Amino acid sequence: MNKSMAAVLISATLAVSSPAGAHTEAYFDSIAAPHGGQMRMAGPYHLELVTKENEIVLYVMDHADNKISTEGGVGKVAFQVGKAKPKTSIKLESGGDNTLKGAGDFSLTPETVVIVFVKLPDQEAQSARFTPLKPKSKTTAKKPAEKTGTGKESAGEHGGHHHHDH
């Protein structure tokens, strides 16, 4: 991807707001993510970003937090600090199961924004913004929502947001 195309994609991502009724960043920051990372919503997906030393793992789930296969999927992460253009990017490839993985040299600060682009086969490309080291609000993180016998989350866990079968 050339630099001008990346700039257009990043600008478009920054300009897009969350649809009405969507999970907010505050909601995701108030719950404990299944793998200890940070969660965001991107179109039909819940994405969880886990960063380790020189490694990125992105878990892809549906809105009920069921795993979505990433076989044949690709992605990219770009690291941005402040209003400067991203200088580092890492390609993501299917890591099996519901993960996209990549490795490279990067450093994170509380001000770092990680912009993730995901493209799964036969699906529209999606993007999300993460701030993995940003201090969480003073509210205590909640455990992931409990599932009921129906495979749906119990009422009240999403602040009025409900899941639809797709």
Image (cartoon, grey):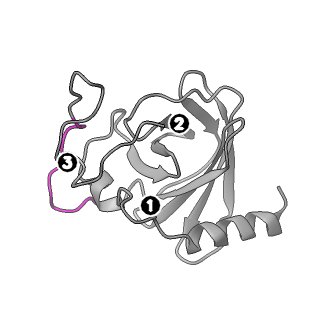
**Nearer to me, 29 or 36:** 29
Q: Residues within 10 Å of mark 1 (few under 14, many from 20)?
A: few
**Which amino acid type corresponds to the residue marked 2 in the rendered image?**
Val
Query: Where is mark 1, residue-wise?
Result: 109
In the orientation shown, which residue stands out farthest toward the bottom? 83
Q: Quadrant of residue 78?
A: bottom right
- Disc 1 to disc 2, C-alpha distance: 18 Å
Q: Quadrant of the N terminus?
A: bottom right
Residue 57 disc label: 2
In the image, residue 132 above or below residue 113: above
Whether label 3 touches label 1, CB < 8 Å: no
Image x and y of residue 131, in percent: 43, 59
**Which amino acid type corresponds to the residue marked 3 in the rendered image?**
Ala
**In the image, which residues are magenta?**
135-145
Q: Is residue 116 visible?
A: no
Whether label 2 touches label 3, CB < 8 Å: no
In the image, residue 125 above or below residue 36: below
Query: Where is mark 3, residue-wise?
Result: 141
Q: Along the polypeptide, which appears first: circle 1 or circle 2? A: 2
Q: Quadrant of residue 9?
A: bottom right
**Which amino acid type corresponds to the residue marked 1 in the rendered image?**
Thr
